Image (cartoon, grey):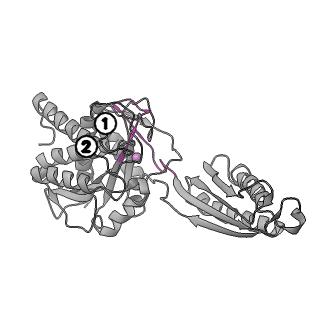
């Protein structure tokens, strides 16, 4: 019975349990690929609730499942579980016990929410028309945790996947998303310039990599202003420039690195080609040897129109105020799943005054239980939708 009224006693019990889970995780943050205690803690909680854990080769993180019909469709809901190298300054009674580490992106919230959804789905397990995989993903902050999960094979047969991020800019009770890209492709570049060092008083005897780097930085800025459409969001930022070590020597080498953010596949493919050509032409013009390296990160999230529509319907059904939100140029490795499995990623309002990664970042714990109810309902509705189409 999906719509069985939940008594206040049950709501309070679930809320207390999930708040205590979230506070435990908050006090014991672990960085990407080091989530050993977090994984052990979640295993214990899931097993105590009688929830199966899949035997997949993941060193940290895990995949659990509840199923009312093993022959039915399979959907997945996902939380990320890793923390950040940030020294917490919230002054909360349950602040991090680990110096220099903090759940400053609220992945402790995501984990508590999805664990709560697992508890709720477990109660309805016999009525489920298929299987729900419950994914606790490691290493989102490394940008590669999702690839590790995909490589484990634990999602091979999943037909739809849903994930979340908390959003301080939305109030508790608000939920937002959009069709298509919600977060950007996050790529990195490195450029090495090698000229010829010389006495600062005799530049004619050398080839100056600093002058070349200066031209290059300016020219790279013309890609977004002159080569891409003003209506197609993209960003090229040089964030590091190093060269030289004193005042009277023209150095031999310079090094640049930075990031490119894009929302469309075409622009993502176009920008590095253009960067490489500009870099090579500056090198050729100024007699500098150049090396251009492109280090791809996660693609842009691609929210499927059909599953995003379901995410919106279920938001309204579970009492959220739904908001269609604009994309950001931040990244989210959930996007890797969407290259293989259609799905939707949503932002849940947590009404905090500090932004992600800030030492005073926190979330309003009142947002936990509604989000758990949302994800359990979303999984059920997705299974119903898939079974009616089978
Ligand atoms: Ni995050």
Determine whether the beta carbon of the residue marked 2 sits less than 8 angstroms from the nearest atom of ligand 1: no
Q: From the top left corner, tell me how far across and down residue 183 is, in percent.
A: 48, 49
Numbered badge on residue 235: none
Helix, strand or loop under label 1:
loop
Query: Circles 1 and 2: CB distance less than 8 Å?
Result: no
Q: CA distance from mark 1 to mark 2?
A: 16 Å
Residue beneath disc 2: 112
Classify residue 279 by image quadrant: bottom right
Q: From the top left corner, tell me how far across and down residue 315 is, in percent.
A: 32, 38
Q: From the viewer's perspective, is 355 left or right of 188?
A: left
Q: Is residue 181 above or below residue 74?
A: above
Q: From the viewer's perspective, is 354 left or right of 261?
A: left
Q: Residues within 10 Å of mark 2 (few under 14, many from 20)?
A: many
Q: Is residue 371 magenta?
A: no
Q: From the top left corner, tell me how far across and down residue 370 is, in percent.
A: 26, 35
Point out the image quarter for the N terminus: top left
Classify residue 357 by image quadrant: top left
Sequence-earlier tag: 1 or 2: 1
Q: From the viewer's perspective, is 180 left or right of 80?
A: right
Q: Is residue 168 magenta?
A: yes
Helix, strand or loop under label 2:
helix
Which residue is pictured at 67% across the width and 56% down the height?
242
Q: From the viewer's perspective, is 277 left or right of 180?
A: right
Tell me the mark number nearer the camera, choosing from 1 and 2: 1
Residue beneath disc 1: 95
């Amino acid at each position: 019975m999906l719509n069985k009224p939940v008594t206040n006693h049950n709501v309070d019990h679930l809320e207390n349990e999930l708040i205590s889970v979230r506070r435990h995780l908050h006090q014991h943050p672990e960085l990407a690929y080091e989530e050993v205690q977090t994984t052990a803690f979640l295993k214990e909680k899931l097993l105590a609730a009688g929830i199966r854990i899949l035997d997949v080769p993941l060193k940290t993180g895990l995949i659990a499942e509840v199923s009312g019909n093993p022959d039915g469709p399979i959907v997945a809901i996902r939380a990320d579980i890793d923390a950040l190298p940030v020294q917490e300054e919230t002054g909360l009674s349950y602040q991090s016990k680990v110096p220099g580490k903090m759940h400053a992106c609220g992945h402790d919230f995501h984990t508590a929410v999805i664990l709560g959804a697992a508890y709720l789905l477990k109660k309805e397990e016999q009525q489920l028309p298929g299987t729900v995989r419950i994914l606790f993903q490691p290493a989102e902050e490394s940008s590669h945790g999702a690839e590790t999960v995909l490589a484990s094979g634990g999602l091979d047969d999943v037909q739809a996947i849903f994930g979340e991020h908390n959003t301080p800019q939305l109030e508790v009770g608000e939920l937002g998303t959009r069709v298509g890209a919600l977060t950007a492709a996050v790529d990195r570049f490195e450029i090495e310039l090698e000229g010829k060092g010389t006495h600062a008083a005799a530049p004619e005897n050398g080839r100056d990599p600093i002058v070349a780097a200066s031209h290059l930085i300016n020219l790279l800025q013309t890609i977004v202003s002159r080569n891409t459409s003003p209506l197609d969001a993209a960003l090229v930022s040089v964030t590091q420039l190093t060269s030289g070590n004193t005042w009277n020597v023209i150095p031999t080498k310079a090094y640049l690195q930075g990031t490119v953010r894009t929302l469309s596949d075409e622009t993502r493919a176009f920008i590095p080609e253009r960067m490489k050509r500009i870099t090579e032409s500056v090198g050729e013009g100024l007699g500098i040897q150049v090396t251009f390296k492109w280090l791809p990160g996660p693609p842009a999230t691609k929210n499927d129109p059909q599953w995003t529509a379901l995410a919106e319907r279920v938001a309204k059904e579970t009492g959220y105020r739904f908001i269609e939100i604009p994309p950001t140029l931040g990244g989210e490795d959930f996007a890797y799943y969407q290259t293989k499995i259609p799905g939707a990623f949503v932002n849940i309002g947590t009404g905090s005054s500090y932004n992600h990664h800030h030492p005073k970042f926190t979330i309003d714990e009142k947002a936990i239980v509604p989000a758990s109810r949302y994800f359990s309902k979303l999984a059920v509705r997705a299974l119903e939708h898939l079974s009616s189409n089978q």
